[in-house]
Amino acid sequence: MGAVTTTTSVAPSAPETTGTARTSGRSPRDRALRASRWVPVVAVALYVTVPVLCSVAYAVLPGGSFSLAAYSVIGDDASLAAAAGRTLAITGATIVTLVVTLVPAVVAVHLWAPRLRPLLEILCTLPLVVPPIAIAAGVVALLRAGAQQGRGSLGNQISQFLQSPDLPLILVGTYVVLCLPFTFRSIDAGLRTIPLKAMVEGSTILGSSIWGTIFRVVIPNIRGSMLFSVFFATALCFGEFSLAATLSQQTIPVWLYDVSSHDFRASIAIAVLLNLTTWALLFVATLSADRFSPAARAARAEKQLQKTTTKALAS
Amino acid sequence: MNASATSAETTTSRASQDAGATSEVTPSGTTTPGVTTPGGTEPGDSPASNEVTLTGVSKSFGPTPVLRELDLRISAGELVTVLGPSGCGKTTALRILAGFERPTSGRVLVGGRDLTGVPPNRRGIGMVFQAYSLFPNMTVQDNVEYGLRVRKVRRERRRATAAEMLELCGLGEFALRYPHQLSGGQQQRVALARALATQPEVLLLDEPLSALDAIVRTQIREEIRRLQQQLGITTMFVTHDQEEALAIADRVAVLNAGVIEQIDTPQTVYRRPAGAFVARFVGTVSELGAEPSFTHGALPAQAPGPGLDTVFVRPEDLTLLPEEEGRCTVVSQIYTGERTVVRAETPDGVTVTSSVSAAEAAELVPGTRVSPHLLSAPALRLPAGAGQAAA
């Protein structure tokens, strides 16, 4: 992402500064230095794109000629649709849970218990230092303990309910926890940039409850943090393998792994599709973050105002 | 719930009697006919329904007392400014009335209803903050509509009320702008329109003009007063600026260290301060020692001391006469337009301040020897014993 922005911002300015009069006065060493700035950019671009391009080529160019045959698996294999549906459901539930629990918690800490903030920060960072496989082992042990209470017992029922293949809540809960280290930091930083207390008091005195205030005023004003959190949660849910595999929940990554054993090309084809989807999401998120930022909306309002004013003046 | 409703009824009837007794301080609260009441009428819309009473309100933050047994009554439709130095507890008093702070003891009543335990979002109070606190993600119009949106008022009605309020505050053309596209003064007008849009019973203003420059400050001050009188809304205005406090208020409450020193009309607070603190804090005074027998004429320019009365003299109540043997020397002149403020000092550092006309000022260039003469009774005179206690 950083590479892309640098390219666009530097490229237009280059012809201006390297006018004929100026270049004549510049030594070749200078020019070599200027060119060398592109080396890391190109290196990163190659590093990211080559494997993707290779997998694209492998997926759609079997035997050297273009073919989308590998994608017929979408229609042929019903288990893919099920896995995709399951992954989407998990993603949706994870995002909702994350927003509904984390945002109010961070707001509350900022407003009423600033001294608890370091504690919350440590708690939210913990998932980062515990390896996912250890979390998986812990979760499996917990579910097994529930299941071993015997058929029909409460523990068994809870264990079954959490692992229901329609919407495995155990994965939702764990993914929420895995998202915390990054989303907490993002939301925390977002809240620091706005006059939170003044906004909340202003909203409260106008009659709004704290929940209404959070959804009507706080969240719209930390839009960037929210978009990042949503995107991060989506990417994590689309890509997490070890936990889902350990709990034998067939999400998209697990499906890819299963399929790769008998139809490698199809698994790569779907992986490419998944990759592109994630990139598209990132692109949309970045674009909408700009488009819906207060500054951009204000600029549009200003432009419209100018237009109407010019029209009024002309007539 | 039932019990509190009945008690509210009885207190309302008592409050209305009280309001009748104090009707001379209540300005005629007229409501604009054009303004619609959103969200229906509040129960108990009697004339006294928006009288504000703080009784025995104390507040401590940890071991530090901020308010001590504060009693304050604001009649319906009255504007009371709460004036005091920073840290005197004036903002705390306002925040207790708004519901953002809970008093350690004491009660808060609005229109006879006990609001002490009621959260701020159910108090139906309008508030304007020092830092505007507009919502940056909403247009001016949406900001003003916010309170009505929370009350689930229908969209068209919200739009109409917001438009009306913006017109009333002279902001009609800015409805579709965002707060950061407006100047400070315009933002504060939006904040005012937003606070008034829900037709609150009570309006609280927390140093609303502190962040504005002088000209805008005066403009908005007058606008607040005009709207307040037009809508007949009970208002508490907190400020540390004494000129502002005197200019806008029906009554001024001077607060010091959590205690109300005096609450009275601006004229009385200025002309007849209740104590040394009020005399010093509101306006300018020359603080001098005088023989107990002294009544008028040449003022002895001496510091208050044992056996002497302390007199607090306003600049317009004394004049400085040029005299060869005068004990004071003019040290500065401050030209304020109509009047000139002349400051003179004795060799031992007692300062005398007088406000004189331009013609008189011409004779009082710095360096002139002068003696002060009293023109009318001093604002405050503390007899010998008491004077020491106050100083």
Image (cartoon, rainbow, N blue to C red):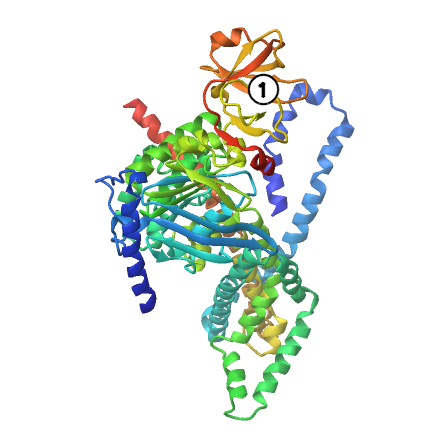
Task: Answer with the quarter of the image where residue B172 lies.
Answer: top left
Q: Residue at x 73, y 30 (%)?
A: A31
In the figure, B337 relative to B290: above or below? above
Q: Where in the figure is residue A232, as x and y percent of width and height?
A: 57, 59
Q: Residue at x 51, y 39 (%)?
A: B84
Quadrant position of the N terminus of chain B in the picture: bottom left
Q: Residue at x 43, y 53 (%)?
A: B55
In the figure, A230 relative to A79: above or below? above
Q: Where in the figure is residue B383, as x and y percent of width and height?
A: 54, 33
Is residue B124 visible in the rendered structure shown here?
A: yes
Is residue B158 visible in the rendered structure shown here?
A: no
Quadrant position of the C terminus of chain B in the picture: top right
Q: Where in the figure is residue A192, as x and y percent of width and height?
A: 58, 49
Viewer-closest of A114 and B292: B292
Q: Secondary structure at mark 1?
A: loop
For label 1, the residue is B300
Q: Where in the figure is residue B370, as x and y percent of width and height?
A: 58, 11
Label total for image: 1
In the figure, B163 relative to A19: above or below? below
Crowdedness near tag 1: few (<14), some (14–19) or many (≥20) residues, C-alpha within 10 Å:
some
